[in-house]
Amino acid sequence: MAANKQRPQPPATRTFVRRAIVIVVAVAVAATILVSLLTQTTNPTRKEDAAPVSYTVGAPGPGVEAPAFSLPSTAGGTVNLSDYRGKSVMLFFHEGIGCQPCWDQIRDLESAQAQLKSAGIDQVLTITSGPVELIAQKMADDKLTAVALADTQLDVSVTYQTNKYGMMGDSRNGHSFILVGPRGKFSGGPTTAGRRTTRCMCPSIR
């Protein structure tokens, strides 16, 4: 008895099979790409997390008398550092008018009064270069109420060396926080945090 021979598939059937195979392969490739994209999105590699933050500690150290200063205030009149003798005062030196994150940071400080008090800080003075009128206008525009002082010629900033820690050379302050204790002395040495170039004298209150 002769073996049954397979009948050749009609052209329409072969075309349908080929298309089905192509579709299956395309779906598999698309699924692989989608999974890969989702994996990268949910588990991003962040260079910032991998890179350690370095700190530089310099002089002056704790117990050194803070240089006296007298600066015009946006509220009118003049503010002297000696006005706050007997209180712990945080000085926030910042870049000024064109630095919106600086003003946002002042807003954060205003919102953190309870935390500052619990840390033993009685008063925050913000200091930047620029005409006092422009600083006052910026404070009003941003609805800020902190004490804002104008170090227009950078005289105080140079004395405190806060213009050495910014991104604009020595023509602007870096973001610097300096704590002066109740006896008018620095409460810690300046600390500069790597990428953010933040200078702080805040380890203790004296």
Image (cartoon, rainbow, N blue to C red):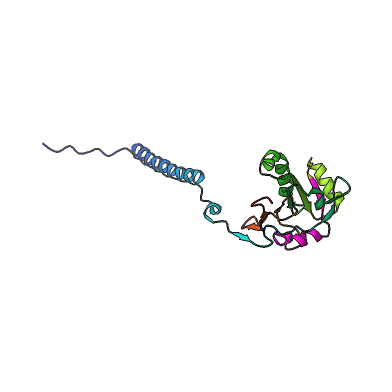
Percent across and percent down for residue 189 are: 66, 58
Percent across and percent down for residue 80 are: 83, 52
Towards the viewer: 15 or 106: 106
In this rendering, would 116 be left or right of 13?
right
Q: Is residue 38 magenta?
A: no
Percent across and percent down for residue 26 are: 42, 43
Residue at x-position 37% and y-position 41%? 21
Residue at x-position 79% and y-position 41%? 145
Residue 50 visible (yes or no) = yes
In this rendering, is residue 32 above or below 131? Answer: above
Residue at x-position 69% and y-position 57%? 63
| Furthest residue toward right | 77
The image quarter containing residue 171 is bottom right
The image quarter containing residue 24 is top left
Q: How many marks?
A: 0
Towards the viewer: 81 or 40: 81
| Furthest residue toward left | 1
Towards the viewer: 47 or 121: 121
What's drawn in magenta, residue-wise? 147-170
Percent across and percent down for residue 112 are: 69, 40
Residue 171 visible (yes or no) = no
Q: Is residue 164 magenta?
A: yes
Towards the viewer: 170 or 34: 170
State which quarter of the image contains the N terminus: top left
